[in-house]
Amino acid sequence: MISKDEILEIFDKYNKDEITIATLGSHTALHILKGAKLEGFSTVCITMKGRDVPYKRFKVADKFIYVDKFSDIKNEEIQEKLRKLNAIVVPHGSFIAYCGLDNVENNFLVPMFGNRKILRWESERGLEGKLLREAGLRVPKKYESPEDIDTTVIVKFPGARGGRGYFIASSTEEFYKKAEDLKKRGILTDEDIANAHIEEYVVGTNFCIHYFYSPLKDEVELMGMDKRYESNIDGLVRIPAKDQLEMNINPSYVITGNIPVVIRESLLPQVFEMGDKLVAKAKELVPPGMIGPFCLQSLCNENLELVVFEMSARIDGGTNSFMNGSAYSFLYNGEPLSMGQRIAREIKMALQLDMVDKIIS
Ligand code: AMP
Ligand code: AMP
């Protein structure tokens, strides 16, 4: 694991008047870079031919670093370019996927916004569950084996294919029948089925809650909320039940977009309590804890309980639903504020207060 001291040593050599905010051109790069520009930083987008279009058209990047393939971002040559630009990297879902978690932890010697140690806690289900449970948040009931299924469950599979191959089952027999069917179609392997993650299907409304923890202010801010727009499930539900039965289509839960949403106001105390609890427990389990953006993906059941089925320990893709500010981020200063700009503002404040050691790793 790269130590904080190694990173601070690198940062000490930076020209503090010429800090560049850098990220990989994908995921949430548009508002990360736009937000940085609005706060007066120069910006660099790491990209490859064919993927640079949005960043050029929307003019959010002052510079581009081209790689042949995204996984090259871990290369020493790219790291060197970033350090020469006095870059602070904002890690997002795609950055971590392409760089590789091991490289983020052990090889990527460029200052990053946030706590790089906590990223593993979102990607390993065991650690994620531990953090959520010990923080005292409600999570769906987990099933160790298909033999134990006694209610309607959602069956999930790891890996980069997102929600493809997920299915719903209400009994052990149905689990094996559907798993076999997906195997025959080439969607699942025996290994996938053996490693299936089985949890209670929560019938409720989706709220993906985007928080920002400021170590400088020691406060958890509610920045926005989205709900997911997933294929093919969101298309499937537009087909009348009778036709659905005839079509015999397997659902999938592949993220294709996000829809901004606000929550019933009387649920906000619960929302803040969840964010505060998570931040407190993360400080204890993975010091210095959750720094900057994080997301709790939840379902609100009919008893008005928010059940958390997933967590992002960094900026989540759903923040794209409020690039021009959300109903909530507006409330803080009466201005449209994106998550990207909020991050840049924290970096700016840390530079002014000479407290950058509190926000990078
Ligand atoms: P995930 O891969 O965990 O982000 O889940 C993808 C999608 O599956 C979510 O956005 C929900 O639409 C659905 N989903 C995940 N977990 C549950 C659950 N426990 N109950 C109901 N729906 C779920
Ligand atoms: P991409 O950069 O589009 O390849 O996305 C990488 C991963 O980030 C995806 O597999 C998703 O898990 C997540 N992701 C990307 N875009 C979004 C989004 N708009 N909302 C939620 N998650 C997203």
Image: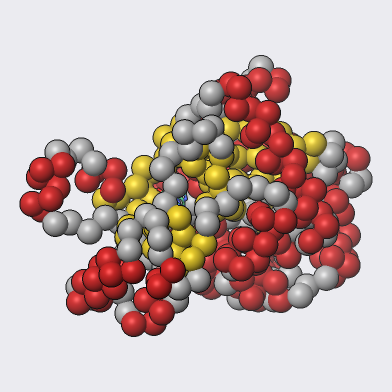
Left or right of residue 133, residue 181 in this image: left
**Vertical side of 153 occupied by 173: above or below:** below
Furthest residue in direction top, as rendered: 334
Q: For the C terminus, give its image quadrant.
A: bottom right
Q: Where in the figure is residue 325, as x and y percent of width and height?
A: 57, 28
Image coords of residue 48 (percent x, y): 45, 62
Residue 109 in the image, given as x and y percentages of width and height: 73, 70
Judge from the rendering whether residue 278 lies leftward or rightward of residue 24; answer left or right.
right
Which residue is nearer to you in this view: 137 or 324?
137
Residue 130 pos. (x, y %): 67, 62
Q: Is residue 22 visible?
A: no
Task: Identify the residue at image location x=85%, y=51%.
Answer: 358
- In screen coordinates, is 68 left or right of 328? left
244 and 40: which one is in front? 244
Looking at the image, which residue is at 70% across and 72% down? 105
Q: Which image quadrant for residue 336?
A: top right
